[in-house]
Image (tube, grey):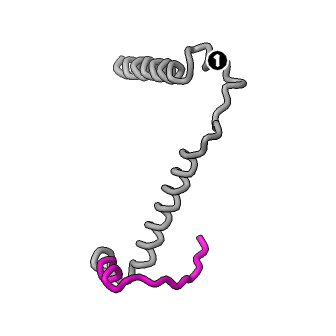
Amino acid sequence: MAHQRTHITLPKTLVAEIDALVGQGQRSAFLSEIAAREVKRRRLIEFLENRNLVWNREGHEDIDAAGGPAAWVHKMRQEAEKASRRRRRDRRR
């Protein structure tokens, strides 16, 4: 990953706390990790607050026929559990 040097200003007390946690040589890595996490969190919030539908029922008649998305997921989980039990049983033989 390419890096770019940037200049930021932080309160001295905050810098001291960061250094105490991660060490002076790890400031950039720490701040980069925190910034990336915050960007991801804010993008998720923006996505969740978006009122436009992400999933369209058109073309997913099988899910509607199963009783809707929740029923379809339940059915898929049951089928996966049955397959898992069969595999465990077959291994014991």
Whether residue 64 is situated above or below residue 34 in the rendered picture: above
Residue 16 appears left or right of 2: left
Q: Which region is colored magenta?
A: 1-18
Q: Which residue is located at x 39 percent, y 19 percent?
A: 85
Residue 47 included in the magenta stretch of the image: no
Indicate the position of residue 49 as horizontal and vertical percent values: 55, 46
| Residue 37 in the image: above or below residue 10 | above
Residue 58 figure quarter? top right
Q: Quadrant of the N terminus?
A: bottom right
User: Is 12 in the magenta?
Assistant: yes
Residue plotted at (51% across, 57% down): 42
Magenta part, dominant SS: loop
The number of numbered discs placed on residues in the rendered structure image is 1
Q: Is residue 18 left or right of residue 31?
A: left
Q: Quadrant of the C terminus?
A: top left
Residue 52 horizontal/vertical position (percent): 65, 40
The residue lying toward the viewer, choosing from 84 and 62, is 62
At 51% from the left and 51% from the top, the residue drawn is 45
Q: Which residue is mark 1?
A: 62
**Looking at the image, which is closer to me, 67 or 11?**
11
Q: Quadrant of residue 64?
A: top right
Rendered image quadrant of residue 59: top right
Extreme residue toward the right, this view: 59
**Left or right of 75, for residue 59:** right
| Up/down of 49 relative to 85, above or below | below
User: Mark 1 belongs to which amino acid?
Assistant: Asp
Callout 1 secondary element: helix
